[in-house]
Structures are given as structure tokens and as C-alpha cells.
Amino acid sequence: MAGTTHTVTNQAPPLAQYDVFTADRALTEAVERHLDPSLLDEGLAELSALGRTSGSAQVQEWGVQANENPPRLRTHDRYGHRIDEVDFHPAWHRLLGKGVSAGLTNAWARPGGHVRRAAGFVVWSQVEAGNGCPLSMTHAAVPALRADPALAAEWEPRLTSVVYDRALRPAREKPGVLFGMGMTEKQGGSDVRANTTSARPLAEDGTYELTGHKWFCSAPMSDAFLVLAQAPGGLTCFLVPRVLEDGSRNVFLIQRLKDKLGNRSNASSEVEFAGTWARRVGDEGRGVRTIIGMVAATRLDCVLGSAGLMRQAVAQAVHHCTYREAFGGKLVDKPLMRNVLADLALESEAATTLALRLAAAYDDGSERERALLRIAVPAAKYWVTKRCAPLAVEAAECLGGNGYVEESGMPRLVRESPLNSVWEGAGNVQALDVLRALGRDPQVLDAYLGEVGRARGADHRLDGAIKGLLTELADLEGAEGRARRLVERLALVLQGSLLVRYAPPQVADAFCAARLGGDGGAAFGTLPHTLDLATVVDRARPEV
């Protein structure tokens, strides 16, 4: 007879069977703030439904299964025919179907669509980040396609559909489609003007034959792709369908799938074009200008995805420390652990608040808001995505050794955390884009200063940070070498101004002290001990 050696005690229960959306006070308040009152009841109801789905044990298990069973490439069928298909675990398809049905590809045509979708993307990213890639690219393809009204009229209803159809068949036969994107090549990377893929015009107006490669093409099972290639008139944007109108497969040769650090449920591939049929989007020679709307939208999704990962990491850390006892009391009540948790919570709330403000700017659509987005999106993409990795590591440490074990879910968050900083242009690209925006359009800086100026006079540390930023902006000599420093300050001042205006005083006070007033250290957990940190932590605690 087996003996009992010990009883399991002092373990936190799983963070499951809860509403991920309503448990996030910063997110719910942002939606209430930015969504028109006439849309609020409907919006909150749909987001709460997605939150309950995201927090269910069943859907969380799908996320585990999708990551433990990564996609598999099949280049040929059993008879030797080239098929270039990617097989996914059923959990992947279930997750992707839920994301599509929740409207995560449908923001452009419905009132308040960007705020509603952005909040949903933050929630859904906490379940499994890999399926966010096709959702993001499908959503982001809309502004690029609008460069050609006929193409937009044909494809936009399929892109914004809430029906997921995984079958590879002509798009006109499908109730909904997914889009991918192919920009970078081996020799150029972020320098897309160095692309060598060629586009030869065909007899039918607007159609071309592509020859070349793409070094990174995520979600290769998508129905169509926006790619860049060199046409006779210069670098041009093209639409490449996977299946042609007659039902035959387009030439889309998947050479291999990338073996990635994280995001393992999603297939990222290298592809070759060899006589591949394509339709031009926009004018020849204006490929970057045409596709830039897609890039901007996916960059915002990088911010949203990182905000979601940060929120889940903080929720797990605070939840664990609420139940775990050590040294005679709950961990959450220990002054030093409370400092760590509060610091993490500040970072998470600042990211969420900024991300939803940018989504609201998309819904507004005014020239001033568009000018703000031109500087704020790359600045937010630079800063928020870079803060995700250290936050995830620190949050995992809050669980001690348990946080280093796969079953906790924290290692998956840690592996995922650097991705959004690399995707859609790494840090230097974002910093240079901010400088470019500042140099080209005076309205960009006016819009930014108008936004942060709304909080002027409310906190002396914010006022000082704005003054210091103006001094830096007054002299842009040699700006490239200090671009990262400048963009970091732009992002922090914008976050601080939003928190001063919208967050509880305890949150704004702590953020301004540590991030703008110089009263914080380089590591998390170095907030001034005189602040009301208990209130900050309590605000971040998920109610189960």
C-alpha cells in the first residue's frame, strides 16, 4: 500500500474560468472612455463574451495544444505533386475561428470598430499569440487594398467577414478569407527598396508574373498576400492569391518553415515565386506608399499584442502572490514584492492606455489624429514592445521556480515577449521613422504636443519632462545617433500624460515619479516606497 508522503498546500489555484476583459480595469475603462456612449452597451457585452471565452479552461487548453503541436510543412503529396500546404493542429483552427468570429478582422467598416477590435485583440492575445498574426494581417490589408477601389470592393467584404473558412479554393467561393504579407528578402531585410523580386507585365491590364523570393512570409496558408516586387516602373505592391479563379493553385513555393524562439503555433515561412500570377495594387513605383497603411496597422497590433502579453504576465504574477504564503504572510502583502508587482502593473497599464488611445485615433480619422498616429504609432511600437520582454521575465520570477516550469504558462509568455519588437520593423527602424515623420510634416509635432499638452499643469514631473523633451526636439543635429533616446522620451511623456488624465491618482503619481521624475531604478521593483503601491497592485488583481 502506497504511503502518503505529503499534502499539497500553499499553491495558487489556476487563473481560469474568469472574464479576461472585465478583470482588466485599465482596459475596460479605456473602452468606456473612447467608445461612443451609443455603442457602449453592445461593445462591453461583446468584449465580455470574448473575455469569458478567453478565460475558459477549454480555450486555454487549446492555446497549450497549438503551441505543443507546431505546424508542419508538406511540400508534396504522396504521388510527388507539389502542394505546398501547412498542416495545423485542430486547436489552431479552433482558435483562429474564434478570433475571426469575434470580429478581430473587422474594424474598418463598423462604428467604433478600431477601439472594439483593439480591446478584443488585447484580450485574445492573452490566450495564444500565434494566431494573432493572420488576424492582424487580414485586418491590416484593408487600407492597402483601398488604393485600388475595384480591388477593395471585391476583397474587403471577405476580409471583414466573421466566418473562418480554412479550405484552399477560389476566394469568390468563400464566405471569408485571410491575408498575409511578404515584404522582406534575404539580401535586404528592412531595406525593402533593395528587393530583387521582379514583376513582368502580362497581357491583361494590371496583371503580372512574379519571380523571386520572400525571406519572411507568415501565415502561408492564407488566401492571398500583399507583396512588394520590382515592376518596370519601380517597387510596386501586388496581390498574390493562393488559388486562382479557375481553381488551380498559384505558384507559391514554400521552401521551409522558420524554427522560431516563440510564436511557435504560427507558421512563418520562406517562399519562392516562379511565374506567380499577381494583380497590381496601386500604381507602379508606389509600392511602399501603397502598403504603408498595412504596415502602420500591423505596427499598432504589435503594441496591442505586447499590451496583452504584459497584462497576462502581470495578472498571473499578482494572482500567484495573492494566494502564495512565505515568511509568515501572503506574498502580495510583503513590501518588496508589492513594489515589484506595482511596478509591473504600472508598465502594463501604461501600455494598454496608450494602445487604446491610438485605436481611438483611427476611429476619429481627423487630419489631426492621423498626424498624431504618424509619430505615436512608431514611438509606441518602439517602446511598448521593448518593455514586454523584461516585464515577462520579471513576472515569471514572481512565481519563483514555478514560473520556470512550462505548465505555469510563463515560459511561453517569455518566449513570445521579444517578437513584437522585431516584427514590422525592429527598434532602429521605428526610431528612424519617428525622425522621418518629424522632419517631413510639422503637423506631426503639433499634434503630439497638443495631445500631451492636455495634461500640462497637473503634475510637475510631467511638466518637467515635456520641457526637457522640447529642448531635445529644438536641436535635431545628429539626431540619428540619439534617436532611440528621443523616441523613448516621446513614448514615456505620452504615456504619462494619458495616465495623469485618465488613471487613478495613485497610478499616475507612481508612473510620473519613476518614469518621468527620475525616482526609480533600472530594474522593476524600485519604486519610491512612500507611494500608495497597495492600491496600484489591487487595481491589477484579476477577480476570479
Image: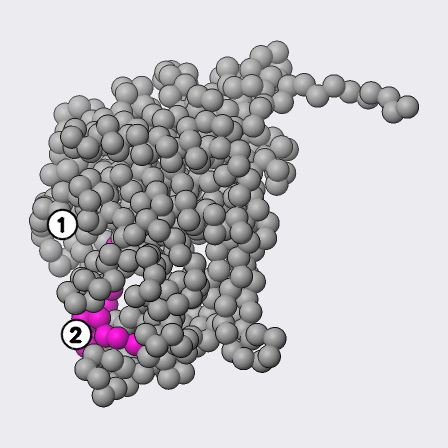
Residue 6 or residue 100, whichever sits in front: 100
Q: Is residue 227 above or below residue 62?
A: below
Q: Is residue 197 inside the magenta stretch?
A: no
Q: Farthest top residue?
A: 328
Tell me what residue is drawn at x 36 percent, y 48 percent.
100
Q: Is residue 295 inside the magenta stretch?
A: yes
Tell me if I can see residue 336 in this picture.
Answer: no
Asked which quadrant contains residue 220, the reply is bottom left
Q: Is residue 17 above or below residue 222?
A: above
Residue that numbered label 2 is attached to: 283
Tell me if I can see residue 442 in this picture.
Answer: yes
Q: Name the amino acid, label 1.
A: Ala
Position of 479 with respect to 7 (left or right) is: left
Q: Earlier in the sequence, mark 1 or mark 2?
A: 2
Which residues lie in the magenta part? Answer: 278-296
Give the CA separation, mark 1 to mark 2.
24 Å
Q: Which numbered mark, 1 or 2, is in the foreground of this view?
A: 2
Position of 376 with respect to 59 (left or right) is: left
Q: Position of residue 268 (x, y in %)?
A: 47, 62
Q: Which mark is residue 28?
A: none
- Exactly how many numbered labels are in the figure? 2
Tell me what residue is drawn at x 39 percent, y 26 percent.
23
Residue that numbered label 1 is attached to: 371
Position of 384 with respect to 234 (left or right) is: right
Q: Secondary structure at mark 1?
A: helix
Q: Residues within 10 Å of mark 2 (few under 14, many from 20)?
A: some
Q: Position of residue 435 (x, y in %)?
A: 22, 55
Tell me what residue is drawn at x 9 percent, y 52 percent.
442
Q: Name the amino acid, label 2.
A: Asp
Asked which quadrant contains residue 251, the reply is bottom left
